[in-house]
Image (tube, grey):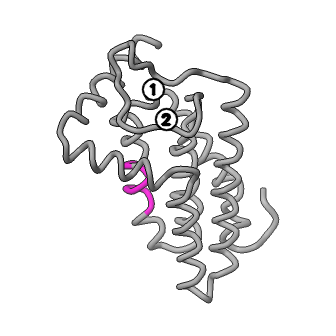
């Protein structure tokens, strides 16, 4: 698995040799730092959609909670990030040294699920942006594919477990 992870990362990181791809990946990585893109999107949803404001706020809370859960898992697993010495030169700086799971992917997947449960527009807009954020972490060379997959799974599961609560205000199941 480790060899496959490294090969996939290397192939996707090579996409960053195109300066336009690198710029887009950097921008997405920057926007997704600490879940900021997704928290801002949830707050915009809450401000713009008064009828569903409480649901947007709960979905935003689920997204933040998923992000915090990924940070907790990172502290336990402590997998180092890909190394420049291994031929993978990162295109961005990171807030931490640990790679597994990707907190960017966790927040992105959580938002895609949670915001999709609140409003159909969330179900149409969030998933492609979430996928782009996930891929950006590979293009900038700061995560292995398994980090991103695990983060996305953690985020989707966290949000799915709370989706009914987020959308309708009922108790989480």
Q: Where is residue 107 in the image (x, y as percent from the top left)?
A: 57, 51
Q: What secondary structure is found at the residue carrying circle 2? A: helix
From this viewpoint, is residue 109 visible? Answer: no
| Mark 2 closeness class: few <14, some 14–19, many ≥20 residues within 10 Å | many
| Position above or below: 163 against 77 | below
Task: Please state the extent of the stretch shown in magenta in the rendering.
Answer: 126-132
The residue depicted at 69 percent of the width and 64 percent of the height is: 164
Question: In the picture shown, does residue 157 fall above or below 38?
Answer: above
- The secondary structure making up most of the magenta span is helix
Mark linked to residue 148: 2
Residue 151, visible in the rendered structure: yes
Q: Distance between the residues labelled 1 and 2?
A: 7 Å
Numbered disc 1: secondary structure: loop
**Quarter of the C terminus within the rendering:** bottom right
Q: Where is residue 44 in the image (x, y as percent from the top left)?
A: 53, 76
Residue 144: mark: 1
Asked if the residues shown at circle 1 and circle 2 are in contact, with their CB atoms under 8 angstroms apart, the answer is yes
Seen in the image, is 171 located left or right of residue 36?
right
Determine crowd level at label 1: few under 14, some 14-19, many 20+ residues with C-alpha closer than 10 A: many
């Amino acid at each position: 698995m480790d060899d496959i992870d490294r090969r996939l990362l290397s192939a996707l990181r090579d996409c960053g040799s195109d300066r336009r791809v690198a710029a887009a990946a950097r921008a997405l990585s920057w926007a997704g730092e600490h879940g900021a893109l997704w928290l801002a999107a949830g707050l915009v949803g809450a401000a713009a959609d008064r009828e569903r404001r409480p649901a947007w706020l709960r979905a935003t809370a689920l997204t933040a909670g998923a992000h915090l859960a990924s940070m907790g898992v990172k502290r336990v697993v402590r997998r180092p990030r890909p190394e420049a010495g291994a031929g993978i030169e990162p295109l961005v700086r990171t807030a931490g040294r640990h790679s597994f799971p990707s907190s960017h992917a966790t927040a992105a997947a959580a938002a895609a699920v949670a915001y999709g449960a609140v409003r159909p527009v969330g179900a149409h807009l969030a998933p492609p942006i979430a996928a782009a954020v996930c891929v950006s972490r590979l293009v900038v060379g700061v995560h292995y594919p398994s980090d991103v997959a695990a983060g996305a799974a953690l985020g989707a599961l966290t949000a799915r477990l709370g989706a009914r609560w987020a959308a309708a205000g009922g108790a989480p199941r």
